[in-house]
Image: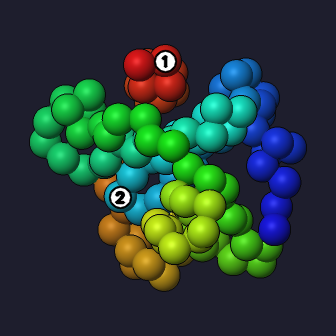
Amino acid sequence: MLDLAAMAGSGPGREQSELLVLDSCHSTWLFDVPAKRFRRILKGLDVDPSLAATDWRAYERLELSEGSDAFVVVLNAAGTRRIRSWRHVDGCEQCEGERTAELSVEDIRRFAHA
């Protein structure tokens, strides 16, 4: 398991407010690590990004596997409610390079504070 506190914070693609940003093939995931909440911004839709964003939602923990691009958002303490996804990488086997449009840093900042 990777250390979320160490991953969040400053650095490429991350905000100073301990926001962890994960990019999957079809969504940009924003994790507010201290508040244990997340939201997704769906990509590739022909609508304003603000219409394609989910509300902030609580989570119990985020599992990032070392040696894999997969991640799991555990929604409850029992671990019975989960969302599985994977990070998009160059040569992605999940989408075979059919990645949808990226969000700007300004869009990510706007959604982080909404």
Instruction: Report the residue marked by disc 2.
Output: 26
Residue 63 location, quadrant = bottom right
**Residue type, numbered disc 1:** His
Residue 57: image location, x then y, percent: 44, 41
Q: Residue at x 51, y 43 (%)?
A: 58
From the image, tell me which residue sits under label 1.
113
Can I make out residue 102 in this image?
Answer: no
Which quadrant of the rendered structure holds the N terminus?
bottom right
The CA distance from mark 2 to mark 1 is: 21 Å
Looking at the image, which residue is at 47% across and 68% down? 81
* Residue 21 percent location from the top left of the image: 59, 42
Q: Nearer the viewer, mark 2 or mark 1?
A: 1
- Quadrant housing residue 12: top right
Q: Secondary structure beneath disc 2?
A: loop
Mark 1 surroundings within 10 Å by alpha-carbon count, few (fewer than 14), some (14 through 19), many (20 or more): few
**Residue lying farthest left?**
46
Q: Name which residue type carries label 2.
A: His
Q: Residue shown at 14%/36% (left/top)? A: 47
Query: Above or below — where is 89 with respect to 54?
Result: below
Give 79 or 14, whichever is nearer the viewer.
79
First reached walking from the N terminus: tag 2 or tag 1: 2
